[in-house]
Amino acid sequence: MFFSRVRLNTNLRKTQLAMASPNIYHGAIERAFENKQKRNLWRVDKLRGQYYLLILSKEKPNLEVIVSQFGYKGETGEIKIYDSLINRVDEKQTWRFRLVANPTYSVKCDEKKKRKSNCSYIDKASVRMARKEGVTRWV
């Protein structure tokens, strides 16, 4: 697995649009891989005052695609082999991390309420957890 990061140039119009509409990043990430439609994990994170696009993937990406749209001229991005980090993790170690999540749960849709709720043509809907105790249980 590979862990990649690209420093984002937030002065670029394309980057500003992508920050407001993350599906733009999603499309660029898809184009960075030869085999399309793989499940790559990614997010934008702020590290030491700079925004980065972080990508975890099974395949090595072509970061030129992403840097040319959202990065700084002359930079290439960074790619590290993620397995070497994972192999160093020991069950007796303590690690700190930040979790960014969107906790949801599925509910069965009532036929009468379909028009009023966020249910569509499927039988279930994804509902955002709003109460703290539900989110705590989810994590």
Image (tube, rainbow, N blue to C red):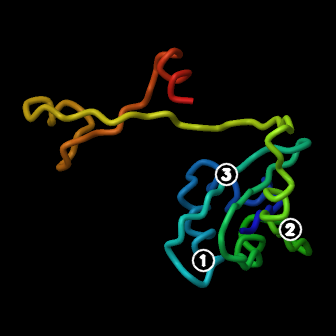
- For disc 1, the marked residue is 31
Label 1 vs 3, first from the N-terminus: 1
Dot 2, crowdedness within 10 Å: few (<14), some or many (≥20)? few
Q: Are marks 1 and 3 in contact (CB under 8 Å)?
A: no
Q: Nearer the viewer, residue 102 or 9?
A: 102
- For disc 3, the marked residue is 43
Residue 5 in the image: x percent, y percent? Answer: 80, 61
Label 2 vs 3, first from the N-terminus: 3
In the depicted structure, whether residue 58 falls above or below residue 5: below
- For disc 2, the marked residue is 78
Measured Cα–Cα span from mark 1 to mark 3:
16 Å
Q: Nearer the viewer, residue 92 or 40?
A: 92
Q: Is residue 104 left or right of residue 102?
A: left
Q: Secondary structure at mark 1?
A: helix
Name the front one of labels 1 and 2: 2
In the depicted structure, whether residue 18 falls above or below residue 64: above
